[in-house]
Amino acid sequence: MATRHFLSLLDLTPAELAQVLQRGIELKAWQKQGKAHEFLKNKVLGMIFEKSSTRTRISFESAMAHCGGSSIFLSPRDSQLGRGEPVPDMAKVMSRMVDCVMIRTFHQSTIEVFAEHSNVPVINALTDKFHPCQLIADMQTFYEHRGSIQGKTVAWVGDGFNMCNSYINAARQYDFQLKIAAPKAHYPDAQVLKAAGSHVEINDDPAWAAQGADLVVTDVWASMGHEEEQAKRNELFAPYQVNAELMALAKPDALFMHCLPAHRGEEVTAEVIDGTQSVVWDEAENRLHAQKALLEFLLLPQS
């Protein structure tokens, strides 16, 4: 059987993504009940981090521990990759020693080259182009609170970077309508946008995007690698703040999500992120459960 990777949401079919979602909900219930689920016993996850992380590292390490497996953390200081070892060489070596590799890196091309030379599954834990693990958690969170997202309307407000690109792919895979509001200089990847066709609309007006939305989502204005642009971005993105006035344009039962970390007073107000419509803490927790389901899907034979 060919090795399956998870470099973007498009690497799984809609049916497979639905399977992962339901399994994530089941595994979450099992953990709350104290039911053992050590189906990854003797499996090892290699974790390569070129970017810093809180939720990603904790959720993957905890997932492997809960499921009976183990994990190995590698920062740029802990591997030869940080000293210039060719990516194909590292992929060939690591995939002979571990059962799966999770990579959080600056460039999508890095993870694509690694996967090309790996004979074990490779998981994208964030690149400059996509953050698919966050999306499987977000989709599980919406399902838990409102049921299927199919046919719903989602508003993306802010920077058209990796999270926005992943929401575009999600609109295709989960069959919802995505309305993106971003400054024209920060629109998402043109090819990703074009491939989504009628599932996605885009404008530079946040009020237009939020109108009638079932879910409103944002992210920081300056992602990792853009810190030197912080002051300029704060001025440019100020009209894109998700506040009570913007949420009032969405449906009365609309949810708010943010992948975290959040900067209160910038991309979102404290009133919104700490308010009753926010599900960011469930969203963060679901990284753990959704990734358990993903690891099981990639590592264990499917019946």
Image (cartoon, helix red, strand yellow):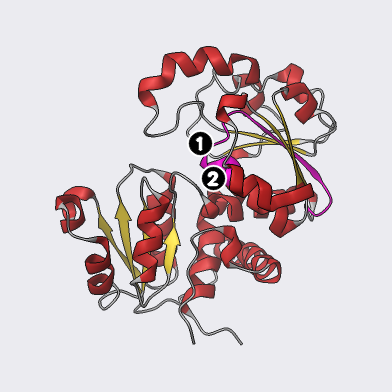
Q: Kindly identify the residue that appears in the image at 43 percent across and 76 percent down.
A: 40
Q: Is residue 184 visible?
A: yes
Q: Residue 123 at what x, y percent from top left?
A: 44, 62
Q: Residue 213 at what x, y percent from top left?
A: 80, 35
**Position of 34 relative to 221 (above/below):** below
Q: Is residue 61 visible?
A: no
Near-viewer residue (76 or 143): 76
Q: Are marks 1 and 2 in contact (CB under 8 Å)?
A: yes
Q: Quadrant of residue 258?
A: top right
Q: Which residue is mark 1?
A: 260
Give the residue type that dot 1 points to.
Leu
* Disc 1 crowd, CA 10 A, few/some/many (<14, 14-19, 20+): some
Quadrant in which the C terminus is drawn: bottom right
Q: Which residues are magenta?
A: 149-165
Q: Kindly identify the residue that appears in the image at 76 percent across and 30 percent down.
A: 209
- Position of residue 197 in the picture relative to residue 300 (left or right): right
Q: Quadrant of residue 143?
A: bottom right
Secondary structure at badge 2 equals helix
Residue 161 part of the magenta segment: yes
Q: Which residue is mark 2?
A: 284
